[in-house]
Amino acid sequence: MAAPVERKEYPISMRLPEADVAMIDRAATLRGRSRTDFVRDAAVRAAEDVLMDNRLIRMSPEGFAQFMEVLSAPAAPVPDIVELAKRPAPWEAGYTTKR
């Protein structure tokens, strides 16, 4: 008798309201994906986010002290961001496109 083949994919079945399916289908179409691919990618991405949010980060006391020192230091201004913040918004008077 042949050894059983290990499964590489597992089906998941869901019942969803029609409006949810329509929204998923529309978004999947805009991305050029099938419904299955779109839902799988969204579920895996959400699962990764949850797992990363709950991941324990360990460091030595020295490493933690250095980390806190960097966080406590004053932020260095980024010239391009400072310039951007000073420009009027597109809906404000005085707005001009940057050339």
Image (cartoon, rainbow, N blue to C red):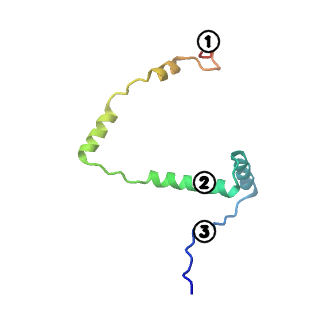
Residue identifier under label 1: 94
Q: Position of residue 32 (x, y in %)?
A: 70, 48
For the residue labelled by badge 3, is the local secondary structure a helix, a strand or a loop?
loop
Looking at the rendered structure, the kind of residue marked 1 is Gly
- The residue that mark 3 highlights is 10
Q: In the shown orientation, is residue 61 left or right of residue 3?
A: left
The mark that comes first in sequence, 1 or 2, is: 2
Q: Which residue is mark 2?
A: 41
**Gap between marks 2 and 3 measured at Cα:** 15 Å
Which residue is painted at 48% across and 21% down in the image? 80
Q: For mark 3, does the 10 Å Cα neighbourhood hold few (<14), some (14 to 19), or many (20 or more) residues? A: few
- Among the 4 quarters of the image, the one containing residue 13: bottom right
How many C-alpha atoms fall within 10 Å of the one at disc 2: few (<14), some, or many (≥20)? Answer: few
Q: Nearer the viewer, residue 98 or 14?
A: 98
Residue 52 image offset from top left, x and y in percent: 45, 52
* 2 or 3: tag closer to the N-terminus: 3
Q: Which amino acid type corresponds to the residue marked 3 in the rendered image?
A: Tyr
